[in-house]
Image (tube, rainbow, N blue to C red):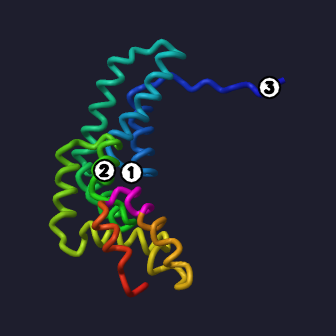
Amino acid sequence: MPPEVRQAPPLSPARMRRLAEHYVERFGGPSANLRRMLKRHIDRSAREHGTDSRSLIQQGEAIIAELCEAGAINDALYAEGKARSLRERGTPARMIAMKLRLRGLDPQHVQRAMDELASDPADSELAAAKALVRRRRLGPHRPADKREAYRQKDLAAVVRAGFGFDVARRALAGLDPD
């Protein structure tokens, strides 16, 4: 006989606040993630207990607004940090912007984060491509006897990652493997 499945209690505003605060404390992230998590709990409560989902959604939005106002959630800071992190991994600007939009961030926050990246001359597309080449051990980071045999494959890998052909070629032409 399967174990008995425990049903979650109906979702109240106080319980929703505790869930939101715990989520933000544990995971952080953008307000869109918190909104999705609260929506799942609201839908489940409405399905299992017949609670009024409209009023819970409004209360959830109020909780999110309070957490944003208190500084517990900061979408702009999250966007800048995530963009910087992706750039350091060797992600091209186009892909960074796409990933930030997919996370549900406001277009203004995405644009501000991309402008911040573009303002740093040391943090260019070429630097990101070189970071990808280094991380994936392509081109000058391969053993010397295998570099020529894998030259086209390495170039294709960098271009598939989202960099332009010229940037990929220049990143792979790096002479110092450090």
Nearer to the camera, 28 or 167? 167
Q: Circle 3 sits on which residue?
A: 2
Residue 84 sits in quarter: bottom left
| Numbered disc 3: secondary structure | loop
Mark 2: which amino acid? Ala
Q: How far across and how far down the image is residue 124, in percent?
A: 24, 69
Residue 144 belongs to magenta span: no
Q: How far across and how far down the image is residue 12, in percent?
A: 43, 25
| Numbered disc 1: secondary structure | loop
Tell me the CA gap for discs 1 and 3.
Answer: 36 Å
Report the side of 93 relative to 144 (left or right): left
Q: How far across and how far down the image is residue 70, in percent?
A: 25, 48
| Numbered disc 2: secondary structure | loop
Mark 3: which amino acid? Pro
Tell me the CA gap for discs 3 and 2.
Answer: 41 Å
Magenta stretch: give its range: 156-163
Asked if disc 3 and disc 2 are in contact, CB closer than 8 Å, the reply is no
Residue drawn at x 30%, y 38% as measured from the top left: 64
Residue 105 sits in quarter: top left
Q: Circle 1 sits on which residue?
A: 28
- Of marks 1 and 2, which one's residue comes earlier in the chain? 1
Asked if disc 1 and disc 2 are in contact, CB closer than 8 Å, the reply is no
Tell me the CA gap for discs 1 and 2.
Answer: 8 Å
Residue drawn at x 34%, y 67% as measured from the top left: 168
Q: Circle 2 sits on which residue?
A: 72
